[in-house]
Image (cartoon, rainbow, N blue to C red):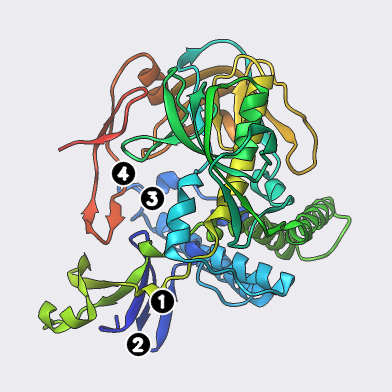
Amino acid sequence: MNREEPIMLINGRLVECKIGKATLRDSYALLPAPLSAFKKDEIDYAIFEKNQRNKPQNRVKISHYLKMDCVYLRELVTQFINTYGLHVTQAGAAMKTWLKMADIKAPHSKPQFFADFSKFYFGGRVEVFKSGHIKKPLVLKDINSAYPWAMMTPHPYGLSYTQSSNPKIEDLKATTFIEVECVSKGALPYRDEKKRITFPNDGMRRVYFAIGHEFIAAMEANLVSDISLRKSYNFHDQKDFKHYIEHFYELRLKAKAKIELILAGKCIENLDYWKAQDLFAKLLMNSLYGKFGSNPENYGHYMFAPDDFNIEDYANDNYLPYAELDGVPVLCAPLEVDEMRYFNVATAASITSQVRALLLRTINQSSGVAYCDTDSILCEDFGGEEGKALGQWKHEYNIAESWIAGKKMYCLRKEKKDKDGLYKIASKGVRLSAKEIKDMCDGKTVFHSPKVPTFSLRKKPDFTKRHVKMLDEIKALA
């Protein structure tokens, strides 16, 4: 590694560094999708076990498998670069692609603007309405390209706005930002003392930072009461991303049609090319909105320190020890104010609010809702609008039984087994089996001992063992 040369870290992950004249980049930052979404050989993972992998025939299979992973990844990355240019991250590629298509310069805001309007920026709604073992049949539905759908309509873009300290409910628009004190029956997002996103439904009156999309949907369903509007903000300049989204949506439709013809033997074009184009279009459609809400305070200048470094030599440049990689110290200095690139967090806040509003309306139109996650809903009777268009809902599975142990912690048994198996499982933070999640729903504590270590620049590789309980936070063992 080249010492005292800049390296790039994102969320503690090494994304770029140099070794000699070569620049190494993390391909997952550019293409955050499993390689199987493009092309991947099949292999029996049992031959990777310690008592199997050194057998001569298995070593040949494993070596070929790993080699082809590298070959396929190179094909994929090369095709992306040839099509969209050289970028480090997918979000950066999406922003550059949109700016080029729209023929405009990137928006720039200031730290105070970010501080004022990041209070309105929340992520997707993930909520458990019914936990434990649910024996009733349920249906699982997903929104077709939820965020791209929201981006088809106008959202705040410019930095100028009209502020009112005495707003009226009848004057609220979908993109009006409001500070409101009210009682919310599970309709509006709220950050608790631990900065977690919740949707209070306890009868308490709170101050919410909401956007018209959600607040209007909440009023329609009579889910807010005792309302006192404190402030409102209406942005003068708004912009949609319709041209950008339609371009990539049409590209996806074309790619899927080509893939279908090729697989049916009715077309002799390159299957790998169209599979890659479909993946690129999907990623670019879904990666743009988040770039508007990025916080440059989370970034910094990083470098590997030399062998004989003295931290006092770097004090004038504000470098401090940050982490260590294989015994090599990593130093970090914060960005200067004029280096920070704020885009427009209000744009991202409005887009995410519109998606949550669609989910809220659908929850209230459905019955027996057990669970929701950003753009999906698990319920007994579905009341949303189904179809193939962006923003409409599609049927995923008929579910025979469900075991819901917490947010992003569930096991759903499908009515019919498909190519992905009988169960749909989610277990964020740990990798659990269907049986283990079922055990959690029976009140048991599951002990999880990972087979692979957790890697982080902030500490040595660690096999973090965990106890996991139903509807409880995952806690690492001492």
Q: Marks 4 and 3: which is nearer the front?
A: 4
Q: Residues within 10 Å of mark 2 (few under 14, many from 20)?
A: few
Tell me where residue 370 appears, x and y as whole percent: 55, 19
Please identify the quadrant where the N terminus is shown.
bottom left
Q: Mark 4 highlights which residue?
A: 451
Tell me where residue 166 appears, x and y as whole percent: 56, 39
Residue at 36% across / 53% down in the picture? Answer: 53
Q: CA distance from mark 4 to mark 3?
A: 12 Å
Q: Residues within 10 Å of mark 4 (few under 14, many from 20)?
A: few
Q: Are marks 4 and 1 in contact (CB under 8 Å)?
A: no
Q: Mark 3 highlights which residue?
A: 48
The first of marks 1 and 3 along the sequence is 3
Q: Nearer the viewer, residue 52 or 42?
A: 42
Q: Are marks 4 and 3 in contact (CB under 8 Å)?
A: no
Q: Are marks 1 and 3 in contact (CB under 8 Å)?
A: no
The amino acid beneath tag 3 is Phe
Q: Marks 2 and 3: which is nearer the front?
A: 2
The first of marks 4 and 1 along the sequence is 1
The amino acid beneath tag 4 is Lys
Q: Nearer the viewer, residue 179 or 168?
A: 168
Q: Mark 1 highlights which residue?
A: 338
Q: CA distance from mark 2 to mark 3?
A: 33 Å
